[in-house]
Image: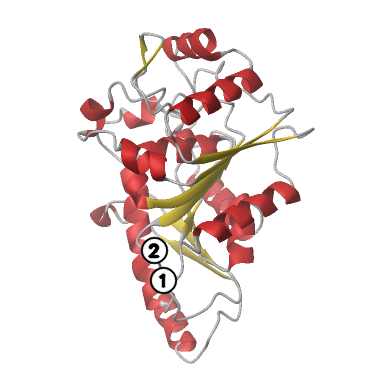
């Protein structure tokens, strides 16, 4: 990998843009804080020597597997072929990072790709704190891109759909100061709430921030989260719901969601929207008519326009 980066850097010194799509697999480096590989995609025509933004889209393999190769292959596909993130990357000509986090079949309740409570309870080993590992990956990507003569801002963009949308939502609650702007969709209508309770019921992670300071060793930065630009979207026919599955939520979490919000995805989303608005969150909510659990070219275009406006600021 070091040779590849050095070669790219040498070739780009005299160039003004990247001549071709470039895909780099960065191997795991526990000494630097990440136990898993990540994929770095730089699209063709990305300007060289001009400061830009890095886009991060967490991987969502959509299945359990103990094979790292399965998750890597899907992450490579998301980065370089088809995803909301790839659309944004290729249209805005900005680099894209996709982590290769596992979703192990041998630990079926460990919903790593959604940053669930089970994985955040891991006290040691390669699965411990994927959020901090992702921050370490971003730091390494910034160094690599600098060597490629593609400097990026310290804060980064985030995109996610379905489980990766849930990941981004939860990650943004923990580290809002690290993010320039985010766009998420298809997240089962359930957002993490920027409040400690709902109708008198405590909301622990990942439902809310009741145990935030105890869990993360710092207070919730409500000011940073409120000021974070967000594009949050759902299809009006999206009824995909992970709430009823044990790998996504425990029995107590499921009971709170269904009783305090709604067992219906669309009703739940509407209530979450009201809660975010009541908390002064800087979010643009959008419902797309006659769309199920998927994205479309129009949705992707709206996300692109959203990010385009944010990087102008």
For label 1, count other residues whose C-alpha is less than 10 Å away and answer few (under 14), some (14-19) or many (20+).
some
The residue at the point 27 percent across, 22 percent down is: 211
Q: Please give left or right for residue 189 compared with residue 206 in the image.
A: right
Residue 225: numbered disc = none
Residue at the image position 46 percent from the left and 26 percent from the top:
278
What label does residue 145 carry, if any? Answer: 1
Q: Position of residue 310 (x, y in %)?
A: 51, 57
> Residue 289 at x, y = what percent?
77, 34
Question: Image quadrant for the N terminus?
Answer: bottom left
* Place of residue 207 in the rendered image (x, y in percent of width and height, measured from the top left): 41, 22
Task: From the top left corner, tell me how far across and down residue 246 is, in percent.
Answer: 50, 17
Q: CA distance from mark 2 to mark 1?
A: 6 Å
Q: Is 301 rendered above or below residue 220?
A: below
Q: Is residue 47 above or below residue 278?
A: below
Decide if residue 1 is in sight here. Answer: no
Query: Mark 2 = which residue?
Result: 141
């Amino acid at each position: 990998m070091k040779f590849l980066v050095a070669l790219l850097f040498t070739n780009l010194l005299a160039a003004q843009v990247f001549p071709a799509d470039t895909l780099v697999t960065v191997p795991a480096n526990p000494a630097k804080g990440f136990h898993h590989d990540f994929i770095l995609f730089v699209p063709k025509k990305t300007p060289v020597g001009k400061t830009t933004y890095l886009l991060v889209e967490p991987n969502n393999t959509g299945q359990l597997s103990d094979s790292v190769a399965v998750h890597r292959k899907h992450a490579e596909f998301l980065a370089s072929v088809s995803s909301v993130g790839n659309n944004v990357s290729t249209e805005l000509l900005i680099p894209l990072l996709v982590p290769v986090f596992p979703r192990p079949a041998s630990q079926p309740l460990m919903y790593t790709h959604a940053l669930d409570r089970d994985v955040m309870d891991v006290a040691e080993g390669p699965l411990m704190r994927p959020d901090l590992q992702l921050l370490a990956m971003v730091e390494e990507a910034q160094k690599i891109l600098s060597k490629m003569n593609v400097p990026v801002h310290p804060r980064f963009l985030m995109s996610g759909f379905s489980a990766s949308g849930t990941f981004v939502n939860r990650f943004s609650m923990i580290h809002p100061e690290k993010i320039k702007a985010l766009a998420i969709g298809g997240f089962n209508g359930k957002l993490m709430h920027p409040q400690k309770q709902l109708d008198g019921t405590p909301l622990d992670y990942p439902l809310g921030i009741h145990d935030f300071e105890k869990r993360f060793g710092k207070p919730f930065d409500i000011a940073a989260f409120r000021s974070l630009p967000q594009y949050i979207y759902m299809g009006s026919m999206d009824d995909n719901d992970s709430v009823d599955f044990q790998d996504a939520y425990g029995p107590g979490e499921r009971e709170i969601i269904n009783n305090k919000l709604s067992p219906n995805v669309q009703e739940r989303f509407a209530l979450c929207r009201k809660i975010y608005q009541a908390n002064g969150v800087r979010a643009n909510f959008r419902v797309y008519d006659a769309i199920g659990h998927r994205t479309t070219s129009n949705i992707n275009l709206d996300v692109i326009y959203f990010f385009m406006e944010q990087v102008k600021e």
